[in-house]
Image: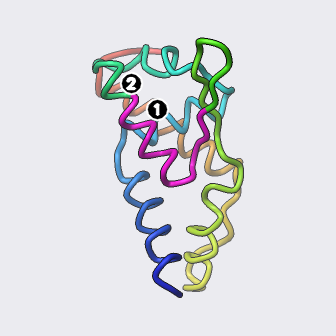
Amino acid sequence: MNHTENARLDQIFAALADPTRRRVLSMLLEDDMAVSDVAEPFEMSLAAVSKHLGILAAAGLIRQERHGRINWCKLEPTGMRAATVWMQGFGQFDPVDLDDFERFLEAEMTEWDRERGEDD
């Protein structure tokens, strides 16, 4: 693995290490969202959420597009491919099933809501 591939993996895993960013990915599994809509459930400034979005975009996990005056976020379909291939190289991990991953992210969101004292 070359330096560029290692750096890419570092970015992906660093982005996934944060629970707020994992929650954002869970939200974007449902649909593309405006940045303001992504920020709504979080108790932080729009600037702080934008910083998280920038980290996800730099890692290649999401893409941001401007449509008129609104910035939209969407999942990057191949964003986790490098990490998946790397994990499969150990032979200990099954290929990532996106349905399983979606269930994992949903569970993370539920836990995050529960920790904040919110109910669905």
| Label 1 neighbour load within 10 Å: few <14, some 14-19, many 20+ | many
Is residue 70 depicted above or below 83 in this figure?
Answer: above
At horizontal 68% and vertical 26% (from top left) the residue drawn is 31
Nearest the viewer among 64 and 14 is: 64
Q: For the residue labelled by badge 1, is the local secondary structure a helix, a strand or a loop?
A: helix
Q: Main secondary structure of the magenta part?
A: helix
The segment highlighted magenta reads 50-64
Residue in front for this viewpoint, 93 or 20: 20
Q: Is residue 120 left or right of residue 91?
A: left
Q: Nearer the viewer, residue 15 or 22?
A: 15
Q: Please identify the quarter of the rendering in which residue 64 is found.
A: top right
**Circle 2: is it few (<14), some (14-19), or many (20+) Cα within 10 Å?**
some
Amino acid type at image mark 1: Met
Secondary element type, mark 2: helix
Label number found at residue 109:
1
Residue 16's mark?
none
Which of the 4 quarters of the picture holds residue 111? top left
Residue 58 is one of the magenta-drawn residues: yes
Residue extending furthest toward the front: 68
Question: Which residue occupies 49% across, 22% down?
Answer: 38
**Residue labelled with disc 2:** 113
- Residue plotted at (50% across, 54% down): 59
Question: Residue 52 at what x, y percent from top left?
Answer: 38, 37
The type of residue carrying mark 2 is: Asp
Residue 24: x, y in percent?
Answer: 49, 33
Image x and y of residue 51, in percent:
36, 35
Specify whether 49 is left or right of 3. left
- The reply to whether dot 1 and dot 2 touch (C-beta < 8 Å) is yes
- As measured in the structure, the alpha-carbon distance from the residue carrying label 1 to the one carrying label 2 is 6 Å
Position of residue 20 relative to residue 36, above or below, is: below
* Residue located 63% across and 74% down the image: 85
Residue 43 magenta = no
